[in-house]
């Protein structure tokens, strides 16, 4: 039975439903997800919108974590490196 301070999320990476506390950041959710390739997670698609790992979840969502192996992850990494070079 779920309490009022828990929300249900669906993770497409492992195909499972998870119960997390309201306001949990994506970085904390990422620690509970088992990803087999061993690459670090960079961001996540939350309801098909790319969000950083510091983004907090307040409502039930569907999410998919991305790493550098995906197109979105590579673009995110490339953009970050570009900003560092500009600095």
Image: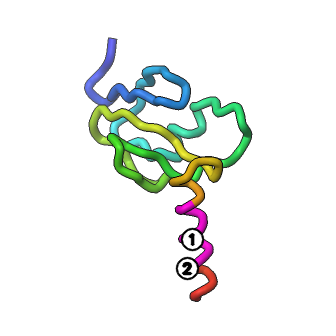
Q: Nearer the viewer, residue 43 or 73?
A: 73
Please state, as top left, top right, bottom left or bottom right, where the C terminus lies in the image.
bottom right
Residue designated by label 1: 80
Q: Main secondary structure of the magenta part?
A: helix
Please state, as top left, top right, bottom left or bottom right, where the N terminus lies in the image.
top left
Colouring chosen for the image of the structure: rainbow
- Position above or below: 61 against 53: above
Residue drawn at the location 59% of the way across and 58% of the way down: 74
Residue designated by label 2: 83
- Residues shaded magenta: 75-82
Residue drawn at the location 42% of the way across and 37% of the way down: 63
Q: Secondary structure at mark 2?
A: helix
Residue drawn at the location 40% of the way across and 52% of the way down: 50
Quick check: is 13 in the magenta stretch? no
Circle 2 packing at 10 Å, graded few (<14), some (14-19), many (20+), is: few
- Position above or below: 83 against 37: below
Distance, label 1 to label 2, CA atoms, is 5 Å
């Amino acid at each position: 039975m779920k309490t009022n301070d828990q929300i249900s999320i669906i993770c497409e990476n492992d195909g499972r439903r998870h119960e997390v506390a309201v306001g949990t950041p994506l970085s904390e959710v990422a620690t509970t997800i088992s990803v087999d390739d061993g690459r670090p997670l960079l961001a996540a698609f939350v309801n098909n919108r790319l969000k950083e790992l510091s983004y907090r979840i307040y409502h039930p969502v569907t999410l998919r974590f991305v790493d550098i192996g995906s197109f979105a992850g590579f673009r995110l990494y490339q953009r970050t490196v570009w900003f560092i070079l500009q600095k």
